[in-house]
Image: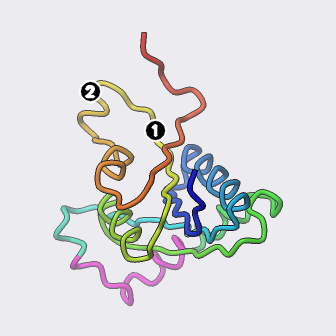
Amino acid sequence: MSNFSRILVPVDFSDNSMDALRQACDLGRRFDAEIHVVHVLEPWAPAAAVDQFVPDRDKELVAREKARINEALEALPPAEWGPQPVKRELVVGMAAPEVVKYAEQQGIELIVLGTHGRTGLARWFMGSVAEKVVRFAPCAVLVVRPAEAPTAA
């Protein structure tokens, strides 16, 4: 296994992304790697609405989402995330492309992300952020499955 010095973990505050955060922190301790915790704030409207998002106007929303990132980290005992540096970022856009773009811009060497484990029609209809990140990421990707993920029959 490579020695990763920058690890990205996208969080949506679901149980699955928190499991991924724990895994990323564990790997960060092992490799003495910098951890980047990123939350992507997706617009409610179509993709064009990203241009309409005005951070000054939406300061309360941005502050609330940044606080959620801090709360997610504080929910982990310090022993779990260790002494390595942790960067916290909030970006606006569609999740998969923003995660890939962040990884490219920051020289990320490993992305650790959770998946919801959807199958069949739900996966087809909603798509899979994890699948898109795996396909387009500029680096290695570790997908953390949910504890009760469906298995093939």
Residue 69 picture location, percent across and down: 59, 67
Secondary structure type for disc 1: loop
Residue 1: x and y in percent read: 58, 50
Q: Main secondary structure of the magenta part?
A: helix
Q: Give the magenta range.
A: 51-66
Residue at image x 35%, y 61%? Answer: 138
Q: Which residue is mark 2?
A: 121
Residue 29, by quadrant, is bottom right
User: Which of marks 1 and 2 precedes in the sequence?
Assistant: 1
Marks counted in the figure total 2
Residue with the mark numbered 1: 116
| Amino acid bearing label 2 | Leu
Question: Is residue 91 covered in magenta?
Answer: no
Residue 148 picture location, percent across and down: 57, 26
**Relative height, residue 106 to residue 45 (above, below):** below
- Mark 2, Cα crowd under 10 Å, few <14 / some 14-19 / many 20+, is few
Query: Residue lying furthest top in this view?
Result: 153
Residue under the image location 60 percent in, 61 percent down: 3
Mark 1 Cα-neighbour bin, 10 Å: few <14, some 14–19, many ≥20: some
Say what secondary structure mark 2 lies in: helix
Q: Is residue 74 left or right of residue 46?
A: right
Image point (44%, 33%), residue name: 117
Q: Are marks 2 and 1 in contact (CB under 8 Å)?
A: no
Q: Is residue 52 magenta?
A: yes
Q: Quadrant of the C terminus?
A: top left
Three-letter residue code for mark 1: His
| Badge number at residue 128 | none
Q: Residue furthest bottom?
A: 56
How far apart marks 2 and 1 lie (CA) works out to 14 Å
Residue 99: image quadrant is bottom left
User: Is 40 on the left-hand or right-hand side of 120?
Assistant: right
- Give the answer, above or below, for where 100 lies relative to 84: above
